[in-house]
Image: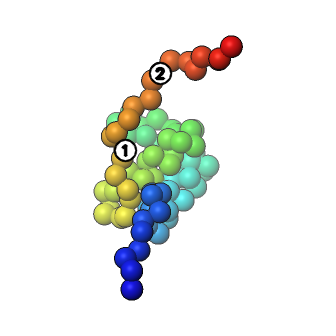
Amino acid sequence: MAARKSSGRKRYGKAASKRVESAMRRRKKGTLKSGRSGKTVKSRKQAIAIGLSEARKKGAKVPRKSSGRKRSGGRKRSRR
């Protein structure tokens, strides 16, 4: 049997998805708080980040944060 090729896309474990799902529910309910400040989280992206962070702490299968190429903060120029 040949070795299976990885598809190149990131793979998350079921436990990680459960944590994110839980964080999204708490955000909707209005009980999800951010780290030190303890402010209520309203952003969807921030809720996902918090869920993944919790999953990492619990040892769930979460791919590493990509520390490779960084995006430039500037605007894209339109070609003429």
Q: Tell me the residue that label 2 is attached to.
A: 73
x and y, in percent, of residue 58 in the image: 32, 62
Say the numbered circle drawn on residue 47. Answer: none
Q: In the image, 32: left or right of 3?
A: right
Q: In the image, 5: left or right of 27?
A: left
Q: Decide which of 18, 63 is in the foreground and name it.
A: 63
**Element at label 2:** loop
User: Callout 1, which amino acid?
Assistant: Ser
Count of all numbered marks drawn on residues in the image: 2
Quarter in which the C terminus is drawn? top right
The residue depicted at 38 percent of the width and 51 percent of the height is 53
Q: Tell me the residue that label 1 is attached to.
A: 66
Quarter in which the N terminus is drawn? bottom left
The residue depicted at 53 percent of the width and 42 percent of the height is 45
Marks 1 and 2: in contact by CB < 8 Å? Answer: no
In the rendered image of this protein, does residue 72 appear above or below residue 31?
A: above
x and y, in percent, of residue 79 in the image: 65, 17
The residue depicted at 42 percent of the width and 53 percent of the height is 52
x and y, in percent, of residue 71 in the image: 44, 29
In the rendered image of this protein, does residue 38 appear above or below residue 55?
A: above
